[in-house]
Amino acid sequence: MNYAAAKEEYAKLGIDTDAAIERLMRVPVSMHCWQGDDVRGFDSDEELSGGIQTTGNYPGRARCAEELMADMDKAFSLIPGAKKLNLHACYAIFDGEAVGRDAIEPRHFAKWVEFAKARGMGIDFNPTFFSHPMVKDGLTLSSPDSEVREYWIKHGRACIKIAEYFATETGVPCVMNIWIPDGYKETPADRYSPRLRFKDSLDKILDIPYDKSKVYITLESKVFGIGVESYTVGSAEFCLSYSTKKGITPLMDNGHYHPTEVVSDKIPALLAFNDKIALHVTRGVRWDSDHVVAFDDETREIAKEIVRCNALDRVFIALDYFDASINRIAAWVIGMRNLEKALLAALLTPHATLAEYQNRADYTSMFALTEELKLMPLGAVFDEYCRRCSAPVGSMWIEEMRAYEKDVLSKRA
C-alpha cells in the first residue's frame, strides 16, 4: 500500500499520519556508542566485568575513536529521526595521556563534543563503574574499602562536570546515568550495610553544584547479573527510593527486572510522581541479555505508554544493548529503526477511542479494535517517515550496510 492510501485508512480512525510523522521527527533517541566496539572503551585493558558479557566475534569491530565515529556516522545515515549520542566515561580520548577515571576532565571528551556539534545532536553520559582494577571484589560505591569508594566517588563527581560541559557546548540537556554492578554471587550475610555505603557515596557525588536545567542525573537499578545472582546493591526499591528522596530522575532498563515484570506498566506509575523519567530500551531473553531491540510486544507497549501519557517530552529514551554476533552497524540500525517503528505505531493509535471504550466497560470493542490495529498499514507510513528524514526506505539500508562492510569493516585486522 502507498502512503496516500495508508493516510486515508488511518484518517477513518481519526488519525492524522502527517502530524504523527512530524511529531516523531522531533523525538530524540539516544544511540549508545558501546554497541560499536563490544563495550571495550579506550581507557582499560581489563576484561568486561560487572555481569556484562558480549558474545560473538563478528569481524570489523571499531578499534579506536576514529573508527567508532565513522561507524556511528554510517549507522546515523541509515536511521530516521532525531538522535543523541550516548557515551560511557571509558570512551574518553586521551591521545597518549595516562589519566585515571577519578581524574577525567571535559578536555578528554572534546573530540566527542566536536563530533556531536557537527551533527547537531546532544550527548548523554554514563560514569563507567566496571571493567577496571579499582573494582574490588566486584564492588565500587558500596565497597567496605574506603579507598575504593573514594576513587569511584571522585569518578562520579568528575562525570557531573563533564555532563554539564556537554550540555553547555551542545545546547542540549545531558542525561547522566549512574549504574553500579555491585552485588554478590551468594546470599549475603549483610544486605543493609552495602546499601548504606552506596547511599553515602551517592550523597557525596551529588554534593557538588551543577546546573539542573542542563544535567539530569538518573539512577538505574538492576535485579541481578552474572556473578551477582543473589543480591544487587542497587535494587529497584533502593534506586527508586533514592531518586525520589534526592529529586533526581529514575531510569528504568527493561532488562533489569524479573522476567514477569514489564516496564511498560511501570511508566505511567512513575510519570504520576516524576516530571521526567528515563528509559534504557533493550531486549532481555530470559535474563538481562541485552539483545538487539526487536519490534516486539513490549517495545510497542513501552512506546504506547509514553504516547498515551502525552509524555514524549517527559521521557528520555535511550537504547542499551551490545551484540557482537552480527554486523555491529546492523545491530544499531535494526534496534533504532524498531524503536522508531514502535513510537510511530503508538502515534498512529486512537488512544482516546480505546480509553473511552475502557471507561464505559466496553471491553469487547476495546479488544476488537486493538487487534484490528495490528493489520493497519504502518509500514507505508514508516516508509514515508524515512523518506522525509532522508533515510533508506524498507530494506534498502541493508545494501548500504553491506557495501560499508565490504569497503571498510572487512579491511580491519
Image (cartoon, rainbow, N blue to C red):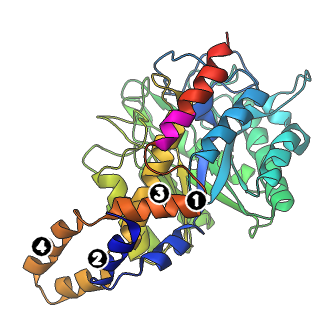
Classify 156 as above or below 207: above
On-image quarter of the N terminus:
bottom left
On-image quarter of the C terminus:
top right
Spatial CA span between label 3 and label 1: 8 Å
Q: Which residues are magenta?
A: 396-400
The amino acid sitting under disc 3 is: Glu
Spot occupied by residue 18 in the image (x, y as percentages of width and height): 48, 77
Spatial CA span between label 2 and label 3: 21 Å
Spot occupied by residue 378 in the image (x, y as percentages of width and height): 34, 63
Q: Disc 2 designates what residue? A: 9
> Looking at this view, is 399 or 121 the one in front?
399
The amino acid sitting under disc 1 is: Gly
- Give the main secondary structure, helix, strand or loop, of the magenta stretch: helix
Q: Is 243 placed left or right of 42 in the picture?
A: left
x 42%, y 25%: residue: 226
Q: Disc 4 designates what residue? A: 368
- Do the CB atoms of the residues marked 3 and 1 lie less than 8 Å apart? yes
Spatial CA span between label 1 and label 4: 31 Å
- Do the CB atoms of the residues marked 1 and 4 lie less than 8 Å apart? no
The amino acid sitting under disc 2 is: Glu
| Mark positioned earlier in the residue sequence (2 or 1) | 2
> Looking at this view, is 347 or 201 the one in front?
347
Q: Disc 3 designates what residue? A: 340
The amino acid sitting under disc 4 is: Ala
| Mark positioned earlier in the residue sequence (2 or 4) | 2
Q: Quadrant of residue 400?
A: top right
Classify 34 as above or below 5: above
Spatial CA span between label 2 and label 1: 24 Å
Q: Disc 1 designates what residue? A: 81
